[in-house]
Image (cartoon, rainbow, N blue to C red):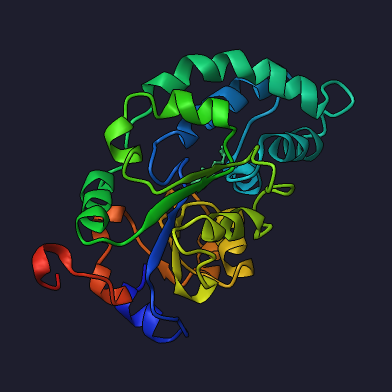
Amino acid sequence: MANPSTEISTKQRGLITHIIFDMDGLLLDTEKFYTEVQEIILADYGKTFDWSLKAKMMGKKAIEAAKVFVEETGISDSLTAEQFLVKREDLLLNLFPTSELMPGVNRLISHFRATGVPICVATGSHRRHFELKTQNHGEVFSMMHHVVTGDDPEVTQGKPSPEIFLAAAKRFEGGPVDPSNILVFEDAPSGVAAAKNAGMSVVMVPDPRLDGSFHAAADQVLHSLLDFNPSDWGLPPFNGVAN
Ligand SMILES: O=P(O)(O)OC[C@H](O)CO
Ligand SMILES: [Mg+2]
């Protein structure tokens, strides 16, 4: 991937004052659970799950991702989107409580908290699933000013619609915060598109298996949250010094 600082300097951005985090695949290593379960379900139909399909599903609300799954794989005559969700639910519910933080999350969240940068979460995940995934990570998630989930009444359409990020912008103290002052962290193509559709800046931290063509829409692309340099965005540096 290109030098992050070089990438940003070629794009327009406002003064960043607020942060919105995606959750699955960005803060939590949970995308692997969806992949695992979807591989199992598709195997029943003699088909294999691949990353081009994964790229179209990830980040979306459950029912929207489910429709993509049954239609793109050509199994919609045998399995409806609703039946697919029922089928994967039990498998996922067993996996979600084992969710682990992605590398660099603790350091970054603690840094924003310590330096007074307001942070929140906007996830396509259902609130019920959010609770299971975060049950062992109360310390990190308690630092979020608020959390908007995919089943929120204000979120009628999932990512790439900007709705979830605009709802998150409204709920900050003194909100709505102007989108040009918000930096979003995302792992999914649909999430990057949603942030840009909302008029926000976006750092993408993609899975290395995701096709590189999806990187172009982001303002900055990093291998890991550990590589994030707050100074690139005019945010307070780690330990008071730029890294
Ligand atoms: O990536 P998130 O946090 O918006 O979650 C989306 C789905 O739950 C999983 O792709
Ligand atoms: Mg995600």
Residue depicted at x 35% and y 61%: 222
Please indicate whether residue 95 sits to the left or right of residue 224 in the image: right
148 vs 30: above or below: below
Which quadrant of the rendered structure holds the C terminus? Answer: bottom left
Q: Quadrant of residue 71?
A: top right
Using the image as rendered, state which of residue 75 and residue 228 is in the foreground: 228
Residue depicted at x 43% and y 48%: 207
Residue 3, can we see it? no
* Residue 241 percent across, percent down from the top left: 10, 71
Residue depicted at x 26% and y 61%: 116
Residue 43, can we see it? yes
Q: Quadrant of residue 65?
A: top right
Using the image as rendered, state which of residue 74 and residue 237 is in the foreground: 237
Work out which residue is located at the far front of the displayed protein and give it: 174
Using the image as rendered, state which of residue 74 and residue 122 is in the foreground: 122
Work out which residue is located at the far right of the displayed protein and give it: 77
224 vs 89: above or below: below
* Residue 206 percent across, percent down from the top left: 44, 53
Using the image as rendered, state which of residue 55 and residue 218 is in the foreground: 218
* Residue 146 percent across, percent down from the top left: 45, 46
* Residue 162 percent across, percent down from the top left: 65, 60
Number of marks in the rendered image = 0
Please indicate whether residue 190 sits to the left or right of residue 4 in the image: right
Which quadrant of the rendered structure holds the N terminus? Answer: bottom left
Please indicate whether residue 37 sits to the left or right of residue 163 in the image: left
